[in-house]
Amino acid sequence: MTTATHPTTRRLSLLKPTGHLTLGNLLGALRPMVAGQARADCFFGIADLHALTVPHDPASVRALTRELATLLLAAGLDASTLFVQSRVPAHAQLAYLLECTAYTGELSRMIQFKEKGAGVASTRVSLYTYPTLMAADILLYRPQQVPVGDDQRQHVELTRDLALRFNNAYGPVFTVPEITTPAAGARVMDLLEPRTKMGKSGADGAGVIRLLDPPDVVRRKVARAVTDSETGADAVRADRETKPGVTNLLDILAACGGSAEGTATYGALKRAVTEAVVAELEPIQERYAELAADPAHVSRVYADGAARCRNVTAPVLAAAEAAIGLG
Ligand code: AMP
């Protein structure tokens, strides 16, 4: 995910349609996004172009894009500008100009490429160049700050380097964003491997709660969650080092508004977690079902969002084109 804020008022995040959204995505990303709507003019996008850098199934990208689009609305992001990246052509257009700004040396050093693609003849060129697309995603919206976790830092540093290089060579087109550290959000761990993040790439796993899991599936997954062999009166307590499973369950319970009071056993704790998670997901799933029954409404929201993004980004793209010698 890319996240950025405009001078006091603009916020931008993109989510990749590469899997089913999880409870981790809800607590760590969607919920802060919903809260952010009151303080900023928010742009939330589905990064479908970024889903094409590795072998992909077209039908699956389309279906996950649709599911994600509907879920963002169901989660309460209706006060934001919602869009699908490929429907705003400026992203791909500016990415090309930034490819003409970036050096092969710096793209070769990007972690994703180094880990997943370097030296493999069938690596897609886009896995090598996607950081320029990510830079375009950010620079088109002229944010002054980009809050990033450690995993995204390298991308935003490259974005700054490209913006500075472009501005120095062709004129002051881009706002060079500052990198800031986001407030620590909830971090949800896998129920079966509680030292690993609950991630959407593992969303078929029994340790991952999907946002669209029905209550009985949530119950089954929580019931199988790893705890430990401690018994006794104070077994239900947080200790990230020695009791990662129990700590994760307590964190999830608290984040979903539940209380561990009266949960003297792991069984009772799991029942409380199930109840809290089901209650958290229920309104989202109900809204999702309503929206899924009215696909024309969802399409309209995203068409309006893309139109607004085209308006907002057009002057930035036009300035970049003029500066670099096009038109
Ligand atoms: P990803 O699904 O990894 O592309 O991440 C999309 C967004 O969801 C990012 O803002 C992540 O920080 C957030 N996120 C993903 N998984 C978790 C998790 N297990 N706990 C908290 N936040 C998460």
Image: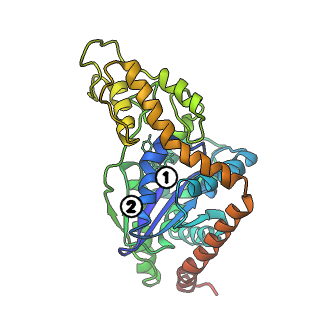
Foreground residue, 220 or 208? 220
Q: Residues within 10 Å of mark 1 (few under 14, many from 20)?
A: some
In the structure shown, which secondary structural element does the residue marked by tag 1 occupy? Answer: helix
Q: Position of residue 291 (x, y in %)?
A: 67, 55
Q: Position of residue 59 (x, y in %)?
A: 75, 47
In the structure shown, which secondary structural element does the residue marked by tag 2 occupy? Answer: helix
Q: Quadrant of the C terminus?
A: bottom right
Q: Is residue 115 visible?
A: no
User: In the rendered image of this protein, does residue 124 appear above or below residue 159?
Assistant: above
Indicate which disc residue 85 carries.
none
Q: Residue at x 33, y 35 (%)?
A: 259
Q: Position of residue 283 (x, y in %)?
A: 54, 47
Q: Residue at x 38, y 61 (%)?
A: 157
Q: Is residue 70 left or right of residue 118?
A: right
Q: Is residue 294 left or right of residue 3?
A: right
Amino acid type, label 1? Ser
**Residue under pointer 1:** 108
User: In the rendered image of this protein, does residue 305 appear above or below residue 184?
Assistant: below
Specify the quadrant of the image occupied by residue 295.
Answer: bottom right
Q: Residue at x 54, y 40 (%)?
A: 200
Q: Residue at x 45, y 58 (%)?
A: 33
Amino acid type, label 2? Glu
Q: Say whether disc 1 or disc 2 marks the residue closer to the N-terminus.
A: 1
**Residue under pointer 2:** 157
Q: Position of residue 166 (x, y in %)?
A: 46, 76
Disc 1/disc 2 C-alpha distance (Å): 14 Å
User: In the rendered image of this protein, does residue 93 appear above or below residue 109?
Assistant: below
